Image (cartoon, rainbow, N blue to C red):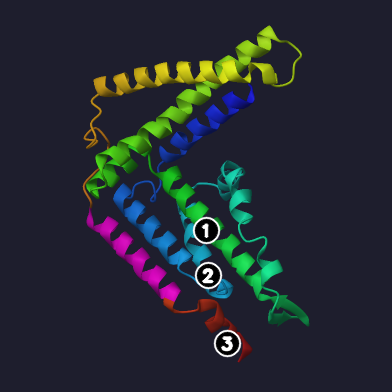
């Protein structure tokens, strides 16, 4: 199994995760989508020095990981490429903001270090929330919920076809990579002289496969309103979950839980 086949296998694993059965999986996709959007909006609204106030927001994704049965290790493994890029956003903050902000055991901690850790935690929380949404909700159900929220059909169709097209392109790339190595045994990677023709053939082959994929979707009843998606009506428990999550997020945003607990322990 080459690297492309491994990537294709990991992509199919996301569909397997979304097909599992748990209380989180059984929630309405719209409820999960709205709660995730609310969570991300609240997380990014914290100030750059509010590291302590932001820390309790970690409880929501950790709780959902436990209830849904999705492993946190799986989340970090799937996000191993994106996570370092997100975590590197604030690496230069300590060089620009050197003023001491607090002292830990006699060691001065600058505001740049605090803002760097805050940005890293924000990126981590947003990625975890997005992964939970994709790992517990199928792409068809998610797109159907977007249409029910009156997101333009063009954008929703683009999202769906992009998701499908990644798998098609990866599959074609795996086939072409195997064919190239059979013609050039013992060679590591693809020679630079073959990059142009290789990418051109990949584009043509993936476009043909994508057109066939879109045609098969139309034959199976695809429509921009996603009537075929298995989405049940929005029930009372879904509304309670969405409203409850929004209220908890607002409470954590307005009340600094970590400072409150710290004051109680000091007393």
Q: Which mark is residue 263?
A: 3
Q: Is residue 126 above or below residue 170?
A: below
Q: Is residue 109 above or below residue 217?
A: below
Q: Which mark is residue 125?
A: 1
Query: How far apart are the two marked residues, 3 and 1, measured between alpha carbons?
Result: 26 Å
Instruction: Give the position of the N terminus as an image quadrant.
Output: top right
Q: Residue 54 carries which label?
A: 2
Residue at image location 33% in from the left, 56% down from the top? 34
Query: How far apart are the two marked residues, 1 and 2, measured between alpha carbons?
Result: 10 Å
In magenta segment, residue 14: no
Instruction: Give the position of the C terminus as an image quadrant.
Output: bottom right
Residue closer to the observer: 102 or 60: 102
Viewer-nearest of labels 3 and 1? Answer: 1
Classify mark 1: residues with Cα within 10 Å, few (<14), some (14-19) or many (20+).
Answer: many
Q: Is mark 2 on a helix, strand or loop?
A: helix
Residue 204: percent from left, percent from top: 46, 17
Q: In this view, does 24 lie above or below 118?
A: above
Query: Where on the picture, by quarter, is residue 224?
Result: top left
Check contact, mark 1 vs mark 2: CB within 8 A.
yes
Main SS, magenta region, reads helix
Query: Where on the picture, by quarter, is residue 118?
Result: bottom right
The span shown in magenta is 235-253
């Amino acid at each position: 199994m080459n690297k492309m086949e491994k990537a294709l296998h990991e992509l199919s694993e996301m569909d397997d995760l979304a097909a599992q059965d748990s209380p989180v999986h059984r929630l309405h996709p719209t409820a999960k989508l709205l709660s995730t959007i609310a969570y991300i909006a609240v997380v990014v609204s914290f100030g750059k020095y509010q590291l302590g106030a932001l820390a309790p927001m970690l409880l929501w994704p950790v709780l959902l990981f436990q209830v849904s049965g999705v492993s946190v290790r799986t989340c970090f493994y799937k996000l191993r490429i994106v996570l370092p890029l997100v975590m590197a956003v604030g690496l230069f903050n300590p060089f620009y903001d050197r003023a001491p902000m607090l002292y830990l055991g006699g060691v001065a901690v600058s505001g740049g270090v605090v803002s760097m850790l805050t940005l890293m935690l924000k990126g981590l929380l947003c990625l975890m929330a997005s992964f939970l949404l994709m790992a517990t909700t199928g792409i068809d159900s998610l797109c159907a919920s977007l249409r029910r929220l009156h997101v333009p059909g063009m954008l929703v169709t683009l999202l769906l076809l992009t998701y499908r097209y990644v798998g098609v392109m990866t599959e074609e790339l795996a086939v072409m990579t195997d064919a190239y190595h059979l013609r050039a045994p013992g060679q590591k990677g693809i020679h630079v002289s073959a990059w142009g023709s290789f990418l051109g053939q990949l584009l043509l082959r993936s476009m043909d496969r994508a057109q066939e994929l879109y045609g098969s979707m139309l034959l199976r009843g695809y429509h921009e309103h996603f009537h075929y998606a298995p989405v049940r009506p929005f029930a009372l428990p879904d509304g309670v979950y969405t409203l409850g999550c929004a209220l908890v997020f607002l409470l954590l945003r307005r009340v600094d839980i970590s400072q409150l607990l710290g004051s109680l322990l000091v007393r």
